[in-house]
């Protein structure tokens, strides 16, 4: 590593989305996506995803002031408008997800088969949460990263 290079990053630990109605969002993320919260209050619900990252759902406007915790502070943040978040799924799970979403009345808005240098192309499907965020379920191989 060059002496002036940034130290390596180990991964994306958290992804945050901002919602207008926490109860409605929790019903979707828990009822449709099957996530179980590891932390929840009126401001934030945090879900573990895949054993290596967290999906944070903040009530819009609830984190616009510095959060003071026993161990320090978290600067303010917020978001507006529809954001995008991709979640990885196993190739053989994608058809099951398509059926699962359809059974719950969640419309798949798009489907893309990505070119691949490997034996199989990656496939993504796209749908929305109740706040209009574009969620993607993608099979391995979309990006030249570790399999999984």
Image (cartoon, rainbow, N blue to C red):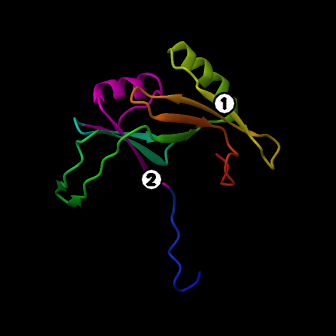
Residue at screen point 39% across, 39% down: 81
Residue 26 is covered by the magenta coloring: yes
Q: How many marks?
A: 2
Which of the two residues, 124 or 79, is positioned nearer the viewer here?
79
**Residue 146 position in % (x across, y down):** 66, 53
Q: Is residue 15 above or below residue 101?
A: below
Which residue matches tag 2?
A: 13
State the image coordinates of residue 93 (x, y, percent, origin top left): 64, 29
In the foreground, 45 or 115: 115
Circle 2 SS class: loop
Highlighted range, magenta: 12-40
Q: Which one is nearer the viewer's eye here, 38 or 127? A: 127
| Residue drawn at x 35%, y 42% as measured from the top left | 80
Q: Residue at x 44, y 53 (%)?
A: 13
Could you tell whether 75 is left or right of 134 in the image? Answer: left
Q: Residue at x 59, y 81 (%)?
A: 1
Q: Which residue is mark 1?
A: 111
| Quadrant of the rendering where the C terminus is positioned | top right
Q: Is residue 131 above or below residue 70?
A: above
Q: Looking at the rendered structure, which numbered label has been put on residue 78? A: none
Residue 128 image position (x, y, % from top left): 49, 28
- Mark 2 surroundings: few (<14), some (14-19) or many (≥20) residues within 10 A: few
- The answer to whether mark 1 and mark 2 are in CB contact below 8 A is no
User: Helix, strand, or loop for circle 1?
Assistant: strand
Tell me which label, 1 or 2, sits earlier in the chain.
2
Q: Quadrant of residue 21?
A: top left
Camera-side residue of 17 and 40 = 17
Q: Quadrant of residue 99?
A: top right
């Amino acid at each position: 590593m060059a002496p002036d290079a940034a130290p390596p990053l180990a991964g994306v630990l958290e992804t945050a989305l901002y919602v207008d109605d926490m109860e409605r969002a929790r019903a979707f993320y828990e009822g449709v996506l099957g996530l179980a919260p590891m932390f929840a209050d009126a401001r934030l619900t945090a879900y573990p995803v895949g054993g290596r990252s967290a999906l944070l759902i903040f009530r819009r406007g609830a984190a616009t002031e510095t959060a003071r915790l026993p161990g320090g502070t978290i600067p303010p943040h917020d978001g507006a408008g529809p954001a995008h978040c991709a979640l990885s799924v196993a190739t053989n799970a994608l058809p099951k997800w398509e059926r699962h979403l359809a059974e719950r009345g969640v419309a798949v808005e798009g489907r893309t088969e990505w070119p691949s240098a490997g034996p199989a192309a990656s496939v993504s499907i796209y749908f929305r949460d109740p706040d209009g965020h574009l969620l993607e379920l993608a099979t391995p191989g979309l990006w030249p990263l570790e399999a999984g």
